[in-house]
Amino acid sequence: MSELSMLSFKYNLTKLRPSRERQLSDLIGEPNYEPDRKEMERVFYKIAGPDKKIKHKELKELLTKLGVADAAEEAARMIRSVGSKKDKSIDLECFLDMHKDGVMIREIRHAFSVFDKDKDGRISAVDMQQTFSMLGESYELKECEKMLKVVDRNQKQYVDMDDFIGMMTRPAKK
Ligand SMILES: [Ca+2]
């Protein structure tokens, strides 16, 4: 994964507001890098909505949020390969099947590792500053600290994987 993901991370950051009307843990659950079945079910229902099927549009939106460049195409491909032929959507069983190797989580972890410059498993304000500077954007450390605070859910002064996953999969603001 790519600069695009990093840019989308940055874009997400700048869009975020400090209020926490949505609990990130609603979506992903307890800190856990390899989501178990229950967590995946929760994620599924979050994406799929009341009809309990993930349609192309929903999948495309999710992939876009995850920084996939050709989200529409990729969504169509995923539905073709794992979805139901009949109604062109992904049901819960397909979804669990699709994630048994943790593809999306792996992608997110990769993006995380791009930010985590000193590889200590935490994204600090300094990590953030360095990553942005690689992308040709310079920020004061103070600005990075501010951004970090929005993602960091319990004032630990760094972003962990759980914060990161929550942010990357957060639904777009209307
Ligand atoms: Ca770090």
Image (cartoon, rainbow, N blue to C red):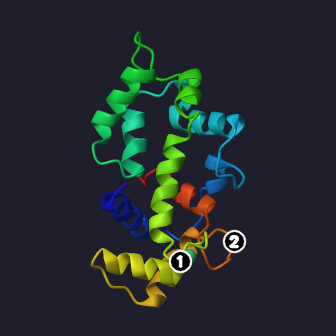
Q: Position of residue 121 (x, y in %)?
A: 61, 69
Say whether marks 2 and 1 touch (CB < 8 Å). no
How far from the left and from the top, in percent, is residue 111?
Answer: 45, 60
Q: Position of residue 124 (x, y in %)?
A: 55, 79
145 to 34, vertically: above or below: below
Query: Mark 1 — residue?
Result: 118
- Kindly give the residue lying farthest to the front in the view shown: 119
160 sits left or right of 17 in the view: right
Tell me which numbered mark, 2 or 1, is placed earlier along the sequence. Answer: 1
Query: Is label 1's Cβ within 8 Å of ligand 1?
Result: yes
Q: Of residues 139 and 119, which is closer to you in this image?
A: 119
Examine the rendered structure and indicate whether residue 40 appears above or below residue 81: below
Crowding at dot 1, Cα within 10 Å, few <14 / some 14-19 / many 20+, comes out as: few
Relative horizontal placement of residue 125, taking residue 121 as reference (left or right): left
The answer to whether mark 2 is within 8 Å of ligand 1 is: no
Q: Residue at x 32, y 77 (%)?
A: 134
At 42% from the left and 50% from the top, the residue drawn is 66
Name the residue type under label 2. Answer: Asn
Q: Which mark is residue 154?
A: 2
Q: Secondary structure at mark 1?
A: loop
* Position above or below: 85 against 6: above
**C-alpha distance separating marks 2 and 1:** 22 Å
Quarter of the image where ligand 1 sits = bottom right
Which is in the foreground here, disc 2 or disc 1?
A: 1
